[in-house]
Image: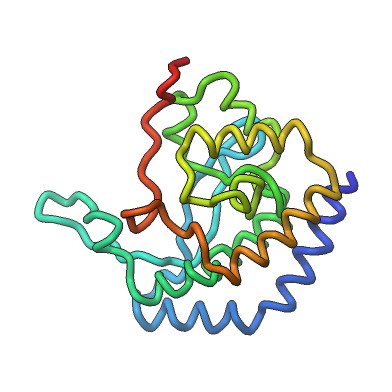
Amino acid sequence: MLKRVMDVSIASLLIIMFSIPMLIAALAVRATMGRSVLFRQQRPGFKGQPFEVMKFRTMTDARDGRGDPLPDERRLTATGLWLRRLSLDELPQLINVLRGDMSLVGPRPLLMEYLPLYTPEQARRHDVRPGITGWAQVNGRNAVDWEERFRLDVWYVDHQSPWLDLRILALTLLRVLQARGISEPGAATMSKFTGSRHGR
C-alpha cells in the first residue's frame, strides 16, 4: 500500500513538473515523425497480464520491399535519439503508473513474446508491477546482457522496499544526467532475447 501511495504521489508531481518538456517532446515527434506521437504496445505486467505501455515515438515505421520493418538503427530518428538520451521517451509511462499498470520502480516491461522463453527463476520478475526504472536500469541499463539484467530484476523482487525505491529513483536521475547504458554496445537499442543460455 505504501508503494502504491508513493507511486501515485510522485507520478502526479512528475507529470506537473515535466508537463512542458512533455509538450516539447510531443511537438518534436509530431514535426519529425507525423501524427502518431505515442508508441503503444502490449507488454506483460503483474503476473504476466498484458497492458498497453505508452512511450513517445523514437522510430519511424519504415519497411523494406517485403513489408518487414527496417533494422532499429535505420528507423531511429535524430529526434528519437535525443529523446532516448534524455529518457524523455519514457515520460508517458507516468500515466501507466497512475492507472496502476506500472510502478515507478520495478523490472522493465519487455515483450509479450519473451514470456515462454524465461526460466522459472527469470519469470519471477513478473511477481511485482513493472517499472519505469529499476535495479537493472541503474546497474547498467541496456549495456548489460540479458542474463545479468534478469538476475538484477529478481534481486529487486526479493529485496524491494520503499527505501530501495527511493535509492533507485535518485540513481536514475544520476544515470540520466550521465547518459550511460542507453543502448547495447555496438547496437542502436538492445538485441532481442532468444532464451537463456542456461536452459529452462
Q: Is residue 41 above or below residue 150?
A: below
Residue 60 lies left or right of residue 9; in this view the side is left
- Residue at the spot 48% in from the left edge and 45% down from the top edge: 144
Q: Nearer the viewer, residue 70 or 54?
A: 70
Q: Residue furthest right?
A: 2
Q: Which colour scheme is used?
A: rainbow
Tell me residue 185's x, y (percent).
Answer: 37, 53
- Residue at the spot 47% in from the left edge and 83% down from the top edge: 27
Q: In this view, does 101 lie above or below 98?
A: above
Q: Which of 176 and 29 is in front in this view?
A: 176
Residue 29 lies left or right of residue 136; in this view the side is left
Tell me residue 194's x, y (percent).
Answer: 36, 31
Q: Name the quadrant of the N terminus.
A: top right
Q: Is residue 133 above or below residue 25?
A: above
- Residue at the spot 47% in from the left edge and 37% down from the top edge: 146
Q: In this view, does 47 lie above or below 120?
A: below
Q: Which residue lies furthest to the left in this view?
A: 65
Residue 32 lies left or right of residue 25; in this view the side is left
- Residue at the spot 49% in from the left edge and 29% down from the top edge: 115
Tell me residue 47's x, y (percent).
Answer: 65, 30
